[in-house]
Amino acid sequence: MQPIAIGVLVSSDRAAAGVYPDRGGPAIEAYLTEVLTSPWHPVLRLVPDEQALIETTLIELVDMVGCPLILTTGGTGPALRDVTPEATAAICGRMMPGFGEAMRTASLADVPTAILSRQTAGVRGSSLIINLPGKPAAIRTCLTAVFAAIPYCIDLIGGPRLETNPAVCRAFRPAL
């Protein structure tokens, strides 16, 4: 079985400029390593907070690389340069607002400023794109809140079957 390419897109002006090391991408990769039992490999991209560049990179990860799942980190706050949700919405055919709602609800248990986050998700072709916050602890909280639904969503849009480690996350699939 060919390893599944999973996109990890980091949107950060400062990390892209080398001002500090990215911690969001490694946090996503660590979570995926724990939760997935299907063979996979990360396809990492690090870009500044520029909407056109984020859009182009998402399109590349979906249309050229063929990633059935793309997890973004960064650019989901209310600051003027936080444009990842806008870029995601611009290139997706369908938005999946339930992901953002569930992630914010889970995050509110940890921090009252979770309501400032604009995480969202959308589908482009056979790919699911999910916007995550930039802090590693928040990434874990958000992925834990929604990951059980991700494999089935990917099934429904025609992507490859993702299997999870039930000790970490039991993927939901309806009984046939």
Image (cartoon, rainbow, N blue to C red):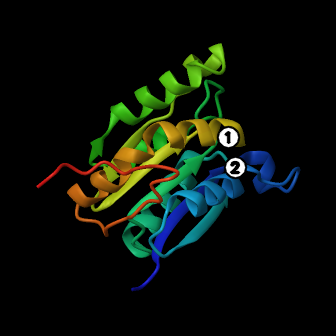
Q: Amino acid at mark 2?
A: Gly
- Badge 1 marks a residue whose secondary structure is loop
> Who comes first in sequence, dot 1 or dot 2?
2
Q: Residue 83 vs residue 155: left or right?
A: right
Kindly identify the residue that appears in the image at 85 percent across and 56 percent down: 18
Rate crowding at label 2 as few (under 14), some (14 to 19) or many (20 or more) other CA atoms within 10 Å.
many
131 or 146, nearer to the observer: 146
Q: Which residue is mark 1?
A: 134
Q: Is residue 75 visible?
A: no
Q: Is residue 60 visible?
A: yes
Rate crowding at label 1 as few (under 14), some (14 to 19) or many (20 or more) other CA atoms within 10 Å.
many
Give the image quarter of residue 53. bottom right
Kindly identify the residue that appears in the image at 67 percent across and 59 percent down: 46
Give the image quarter of residue 62. bottom left
Q: Which residue is mark 2?
A: 24
The x and y percentages for residue 107 are 58, 25
